[in-house]
Image (spheres, rainbow, N blue to C red):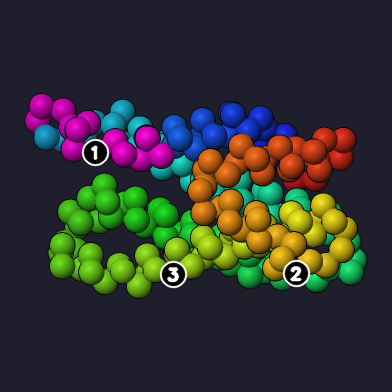
């Protein structure tokens, strides 16, 4: 996963866009004439989910964990909460993809139950916002090598509102930080 620390911003942006486009492919459009899913179709659906999970959640995980290792001793941040949030996002992401692809819906779960997903979706949005907050704060702390306040990192936090376009700017800063450093996996 250390590739995310040195990847070109254009390559990262393209990988994110490709993963989003792949997630838009409906499994119904991949059915063969008999209405059954072939092995190739199932394999494609699993691989697109895995690729999207690695790209969309692998970048925040890799950046957050490796920037945390570069924090000065005077800065205290809770990496455990960050890992829990990313764990929830991973589970939610896979469950949402399975539900939206109809895999679990075919097993007897009614369409009515989709309204029960709203709280889980809301929690996932809060978790995503926390990830962006954590990365913004930790990136600025590593750049300044001191504890930061909201005024110091509010620019990065604002930029994450325009994710993935944010990566054109932020990834360049991450590349500079890890340019000559040895990265431990």
Q: Helix, strand or loop at disc 2? A: loop
Q: What distance separates the C-alpha of mark 1 from that of mark 3? A: 27 Å
Describe the element under mark 3 as helix, strand or loop.
helix
Residue projecting furthest to the right:
73
* Circle 1 Cα neighbour tier, 10 Å, few/some/many (<14 / 14–19 / ≥20): some
User: Closer to the observer: label 3 or label 2?
Assistant: 2
Q: Earlier in the sequence, mark 3 or mark 2?
A: 3
- Magenta-tinted stretch: 20-34
Q: Residue at the spot x=31%, y=51% of the render?
A: 98
In magenta stretch: residue 47: no
Occupied quadrant, residue 112: bottom left
Q: Against 8, is 116 above or below? A: below
Residue farthest left in this picture: 34
- What residue is pinned by disc 2? 149
- Closer to viewer: mark 1 or mark 2: 2
Residue 168, percent across and down?
Answer: 61, 37
Q: Is mark 1 on a helix, strand or loop?
A: helix
């Amino acid at each position: 996963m250390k590739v995310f620390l040195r990847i070109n911003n254009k390559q990262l942006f393209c990988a994110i866009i490709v993963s989003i486009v792949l997630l838009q492919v409906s499994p119904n459009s991949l059915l063969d004439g008999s209405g059954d899913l072939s092995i190739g179709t199932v394999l494609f659906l699993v691989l697109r989910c895995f690729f999207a999970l690695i790209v969309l959640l692998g970048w925040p995980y890799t950046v957050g964990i490796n920037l945390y290792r570069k924090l000065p001793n005077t800065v205290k941040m809770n990496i455990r909460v960050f890992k829990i949030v990313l764990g929830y996002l991973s589970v939610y992401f896979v469950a949402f993809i399975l539900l939206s692809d109809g895999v679990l819906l075919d097993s007897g779960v009614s369409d009515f139950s989709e309204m029960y997903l709203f709280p889980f979706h809301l929690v996932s949005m809060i978790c995503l916002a926390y990830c962006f907050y954590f990365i913004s704060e930790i990136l600025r702390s590593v750049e300044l090598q001191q504890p930061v306040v909201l005024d110091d990192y509010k620019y990065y936090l604002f930029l994450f509102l325009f994710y993935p376009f944010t990566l054109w700017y932020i990834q360049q800063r991450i590349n500079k930080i890890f340019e000559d450093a040895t990265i431990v996996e």
